Image (cartoon, rainbow, N blue to C red):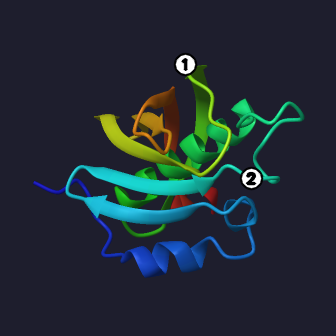
Amino acid sequence: MAIWKRNSTLEQINQRSQGTMVAHVGIVFTAMEPESLQATMPVDERTRQPFGLLHGGASAVLAETLGSMAGYLCTEGDDYIVGLEINANHVRSAREGQVRGVCRAVHLGRTHQVWQIEIFDRHQKLCCTSRLTTAVLSAKAKG
């Protein structure tokens, strides 16, 4: 059973990212399964640290991008998502190619969500495991 409440295509999700940091670092959403969302990010001059490895902050950007978009896709109407906390454990380095993030829900509540994001290198070896907690906010509550 799919967890998504919004009817969005990968093309629409990628279009929404244009003109943002998501597009600037080359993140592309590549798959939306019934219970997971995936995206890739290049390991290049935008995402490497000065010693030639994938920057841990870039991995966190990929993780938060995936969790936030997945969270948004699990809301309805004017509701939106903001990140509350993210952690990332970097377990393997990547120097080239691209990495692939896979995001799955741990908890989908009315006011908050918890997402698990795993990032793999081009050899499908785990590079980073991250957990993102988001808050579900309502635009109606602002008014």
Q: Which residue is mark 1?
A: 91
Q: Is residue 57 above or below residue 92?
A: below
How far apart are the alpha carbons under marks 1 and 2? 19 Å
Task: Report helix, strand or loop for mark 2.
Answer: loop
User: Sequence-wise, which precedes: disc 1 or disc 2?
Assistant: 2
Question: Which residue is more in the foreground, 65 or 139?
Answer: 65
Number of marks in the image? Answer: 2
Residue farthest toward the right in the current orientation of the protein: 50
- Spot occupied by residue 15 in the image (x, y as percentages of width and height): 56, 80
Seen at 60% across and 29% down, the residue is 86
**Is residue 108 in sight in this rendering?**
no
Give the quarter of the figure containing the C terminus. Answer: bottom right
Crowding around mark 2 (Cα neighbors within 10 Å: few <14, some 14 to 19, many 20+) is: some
- Spot occupied by residue 75 in the image (x, y as percentages of width and height): 37, 58
Q: Is residue 49 above or below residue 15?
A: above
Residue 19 falls in which quadrant of the image? bottom right
Residue 17 falls in which quadrant of the image? bottom right
Q: In the drawing, what numbered circle is on residue 129?
A: none
Q: In the drawing, what numbered circle is on residue 44?
A: 2
- Spot occupied by residue 96 in the image (x, y as percentages of width and height): 65, 46
Question: Which residue is more in the foreground, 134 or 92?
Answer: 92
**Is residue 120 in sight in this rendering?**
yes
Task: Report helix, strand or loop for mark 1.
Answer: loop
Query: Looking at the image, do the residues carrying marks 1 and 2 touch, with CB atoms under 8 Å apart?
Result: no
Seen at 40% across and 70% down, the residue is 77
67 sits left or right of 95 in the view: left
Question: Which residue is more in the foreground, 134 or 141?
Answer: 134
- Spot occupied by residue 124 in the image (x, y as percentages of width and height): 40, 39
Seen at 56% across and 23% down, the residue is 92
Q: Amino acid at mark 1?
A: Val
Seen at 62% across and 28% down, the residue is 93
